[in-house]
Image: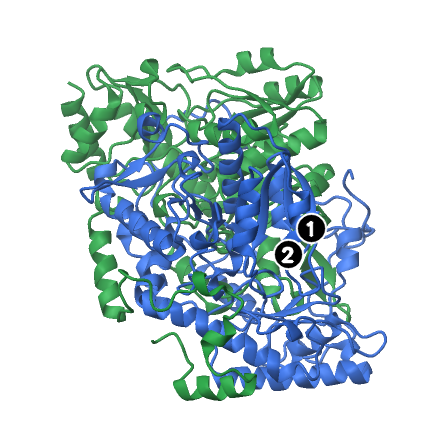
Chain colours: A blue, B green
Amino acid sequence: MTINQSGWKPSTPVKGPGDTGTVTGNRALMLEEPLIFELDAGESAGVDLPDVPQVTCRLGGLERSERIGLPGLTEPETVRHYTRLSRQNYGIDLGLFPLGSCTMKHNPRLNEKMARLPGFADIHPLAPKETVSGAIELINELAFWLIDLTGMHGLAMSPKAGAHGELCGLLCIRAALEARGDAREVVLVPESAHGTNPATAAFCGYRVENIPANSDGRVDLEALKERLGPDVAAVMITNPNTCGLFEPDMKAISEAVHAAGGLVYCDGANFNAIVGKVRPGDLGIDAMHINLHKTFSTPHGGGGPGSGPVVLSEALSPFGPIPYTARYADGSVKLIEEEEAANEHPSSFGRMTAFHGQMGMFTRALTYILSHGADGLKQVAEDAVLNANYILRSLEDVLDAPFAHSGPCMHEAIFSDRGFADGFTTLDLAKALIDEGFHPMTMYFPLVVHGAMLVEPTETESKAALDQFIAALRHVAERARAGDEALKSAPIHAPRRRLDETLAARKPIVAYRQPAPDGAESPTRSEVGDR
Amino acid sequence: MRYLPLSDTDRRAMLGTIGASSVDELFRDVPESARLSGPIAGLPMHAPEMAVERHLTALARKNTPAGEAPFFLGCGAYKHHIPASVDHLIQRGEFLTAYTPYQPEIAQGTLQVLFEFKTQVALLLGCEVANASMYDGSTACWEAIGMARRITRRAKAILSSGLHPHYVSVCKTMARFTGDTLESALPQLAAETDTDHLIASIDDATSAVVVQYPDILGRVTDLQPIADAAHAKGALLIAVITEPVALGLLKAPGEMGADIVVGEGQSIGVGLQFGGPYVGLFACREKHIRQMPGRLAGETVDAEGKRGFVLTLSTREQHIRREKATSNICTNSGLCALAFSIHMTLLGEKGLRQLAELNHARAVQLAERLSVLPGVRLVNDSFFNEFTLELPVEARPAVHAMVKKGVLGGVSLGRLYPGADALEQGLVVAVTETATDADFDALEAALKEVAK
């Protein structure tokens, strides 16, 4: 079998006009690394398995006859391959990672250790319940912390990530509306919302409409009230919002939505800013997902896995998904699945994943919560907000801060590209920040700010780290204002210079294929895919 | 507080720079009535590492790990040996504490891993392209049905009775809200799968047929006739894999005409973890790539002409397309995909094949021993490392009775299909390379006892 038949011959990894002149293409500690498919000698393996006993095969005549084509490496080669690749990555362990809306805080290593206890890591999701009572207790303990911290009524633990949590919340809302025979079709979403909000609403069959923002970067309450009506199922609000601002009218928004018969979904991506300080339940919210990988510091892992439990109001709790854990008056806990649901959770909208959600993340999040306690979590929010305001006020003279006039920000500071020299962009500034040894901030989001730069330092940065970051950002901002042409070629010190994303999208090569044999004509990239 | 670097001196200095007299002043947008004045009442205060560790360890001790008992559970999650280097490598901070590779110049590690992972998955499943992973097998299964709807512009999917009932539940949850029609049925305790019934059910309104391979009872069936019948009516074949090790030995679904192949990748590199996090596999034909959900890493060059990798074709995704995206998914299961990829690299072609042969051979040995027990019938003619027994008694209490004898003996169909009387004597037994002869003896003895 060949892959990507219309592809383009892969370049060799080390050659190029900008080469440093070493034979290997390496630059001291920066080591180039081929693909596993280019390393494989064919018959290697990094495992030694017992001999296979002789038996009569019972595969129904469906044995594979062809080779799969999988490369194999011994353990030393494998360790070296992935260690070398790891060194081409930036991570929180290396430095400040101010990716707004993503909450890149330190990941405590105790959390990793606890998640690896065999009693949590090595238990089967369908194990007889009497053999996993500690796991069920753990889920329940975390659930009660999350309920207490948010002032809500119930909880759905199974959603696998933030966007999956949004889906869970909207399915609860839809189930609740259907239960009262109320077929509403529209979900209102602010323009500044994460892209997952409108995508989720559409994914479960709603029509999405925008809510306008006012000049202070907040939801325009009057415009919202005007739009509310019998067709509006729900409003999805991020609070604090994606401009890093608290929605001071949140309670009035909730009351208006409820008065019009709708429900309020809160995107809890930014809960880190208010954990221990404000309970969303006090603001009239009906459902909110909590990104355990943000507020409660389960590792981001290069893009997941996340975890997105959803806290629910009393009105929505009966509709939450199974499986879930219930706690009874005598303190006992129980895992409710299909069999028990008929009696104990009859209005549930059903199952949204095969098993119990992200148990590995629950263990880490509970460890984090117990380490911090009620006092530490409050301090988390305060320090996160303090750090963001420190950055905002330290840089507002060189970077345009569109909402700085309206007061303090919450856990993230937003800047725009206003004041940059002609032809200089947020992208140029971000790439120059890479050369300074930092991961750039979130760029071009939210969409309501031109050339947006959303900076979220988090609470796990020291003042010294913040001061160094501020100095670096000040320097590159000054270069962008002055129109320093050198900025256009940044980064120059990273493992790669700017990558051609247009080429990648126009003529995609999304899997490795064997290069053409010597002498054969190299195929060229070509368009693929039905649009 | 060991995780918070600011000192009170720092805080005072920073408030001075900001021009605020207190931290509370920074929260002034929060209405006074909603602001808590102190730590939330009734919750404990911060705790030392030692105390937290003691508490969690006590909870963990209440559970019986798979490695500490004769263990034969499967049905969508499998206990395999994971080489020590896998967990070591995924804990490197540059992998563990990285974000989605939105800045490719400083994320080539993650991006190259994803490119390699996607290629490994595509090869294994017999498809041209794969994505950078989904949450798990069950959510990947629903996404495949949605993708088939977009490709065929039809909204009726036929689910095989051999599809994992929890996967069916996930699809039904979603279909209730999207308006898709799903046809499904309960499996029967028979050697034959429902291939003939599926073929007969396909009509001009069918978007896709969804078949699990091997199925929930462990049976293996040729997908080619189903693919041919689906294609003849303009429908797609979606194949679902819950045990990817099987494909070391079995023909890949893509080779038998499946258009979309999805699966649960947990078996390779990822521990049982009570159900998550796992890693959803998703592969398809290259011509359908623009209808695919999830992330893709693609090859390109940098400004100096060096090869590099970037996230690509993101115009399908929610952060660009918002309500018009192919899915609302915003993450993949990155670290689990890394674990899968490392384990697969350690196995290689030869290791995977040997692992698969070992699993099959051990399963055949155990099936032969158990099927001669009085009153016990082996349902399967064919299987890979998992088979179904029909016991002379109800299987659900039998499982609990075996726990009392220290044996985790299998998954009862009564648990998976509550209320289905015809299935209540069914017990699904999974055998991997981790089961020893002593484990076999223990299961045989326990089953003999409880199946009386």
Residue sitting nearer the eye, A316 or B400 = A316
Number of other residues with Cα within 10 Å of mark 1, as a class: few under 14, some 14 to 19, many 20 or more: few
Q: Is residue A303 left or right of residue A445?
A: left
Helix, strand or loop at mark 1 = helix
Residue at the image position 82 percent from the left and 47 percent from the top: A526
Residue at the image position 50 percent from the left and 85 percent from the top: B14
Q: Is residue B37 left or right of residue A256?
A: left
Please say whether residue A108 is visible from this viewpoint: no
Q: Is residue B305 above or below residue A137?
A: below
Provide residue A429's location: percent of width, then percent of height.
Answer: 72, 76
Please say whether residue B16 is visible from this viewpoint: yes
- For residue A223, the mark is 1
Farthest residue in the right direction?
Answer: A422
Q: Is residue B120 above or below residue A52?
A: below
**Amino acid marked by disc 2:** Val
Residue sitting nearer the eye, B362 or B319 = B319
Q: Do badges 2 and 1 share one subunit?
A: yes
Q: Is residue A402 left or right of residue A289?
A: right
Helix, strand or loop at mark 2 = loop
**Amino acid marked by disc 1:** Ala
Q: Is residue A200 above or below residue B35?
A: above
Image quadrant in which the N terminus of chain B is located: bottom left
Image quadrant in which the C terminus of chain B is located: top left
Number of other residues with Cα within 10 Å of mark 2, as a class: few under 14, some 14 to 19, many 20 or more: many
Provide residue B296's location: percent of width, then percent of height.
Answer: 65, 50
Provide residue B274's location: percent of width, then percent of height.
Answer: 34, 44
Chain letter of the residue beneath label 2 in the structure image: A
Residue sitting nearer the eye, A270 or B149 = A270
